[in-house]
Amino acid sequence: MIAQLHNNQLKKGLNMAALSEDMKTFIENNLAWIATISKDGELDLGPKMSMFVLDDNHLAYHERTAGQHFKNLQDGSQLVVAVANLAEKKGYRFRGTVTLHTDDAIYEEQVRVAEEKGTKKPAAVPVMEITEIQDLTSGANAGKTIAKD
């Protein structure tokens, strides 16, 4: 399904922001934090230990608590993901739009992953289509956009 979405985007002439191999490894080895916003404009920030790279253009995680972030996403909030490593003074910020998966192949595969890991079954699997990547590495380029659709 994601591949089909990606192919449809390419046919429309859109150039999606893509993750490098370095970014994928960095996400895999560091804690991700997400931010959403409510309909009333209240920001919410929290860690997501289940964040993973779905493909070159999408990040996803297991929404286990179905709390405020989930409600905000249901209400149409965009998603911001930040991943940083203090010792390396390096990080990335990813922005994008989200599709909530609750009853399809993506969801079912992640339910199997949760069962294998012995973690709680996700209420949903939010998948973010990355539209912007920013560098959070300490120095002159901190906060600068690396890629944007």
Image: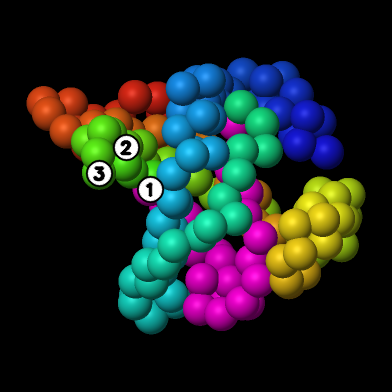
Residue bearing the label numbered 3 = 86
In the shown orientation, is residue 126 left or right of residue 149?
Answer: right
Residue 81: x, y in percent? Answer: 43, 50
74 in magenta: yes
Q: Residue at x 44, y 76 (%)?
A: 39
The residues bearing labels 2 and 3 have C-alpha atoms spaced at a distance of 9 Å
At mark 3, the secondary structure is loop
Mark 2 against mark 3, which lies toward the viewer?
A: 3
For residue 109, above or below residue 58: below
Precedes in sequence: disc 2 or disc 3? 3
Residue 3: x, y in percent? Answer: 78, 29
Callout 3 amino acid: Leu
Highlighted range, magenta: 57-82
Residue bearing the label numbered 1 = 82
Residue bearing the label numbered 2 = 91
In the shown orientation, is residue 78 left or right of residue 119?
Answer: left
Q: Residue at x 51, y 71 (%)?
A: 69
How dense is the environment of label 3, judged by Cα within 10 Å: few (below 14), some, or many (20 and up)? few
Callout 1 amino acid: Ala
C-beta proximity under 8 Å, tags 2 and 3: no
Residue 135: x, y in percent? Answer: 29, 31
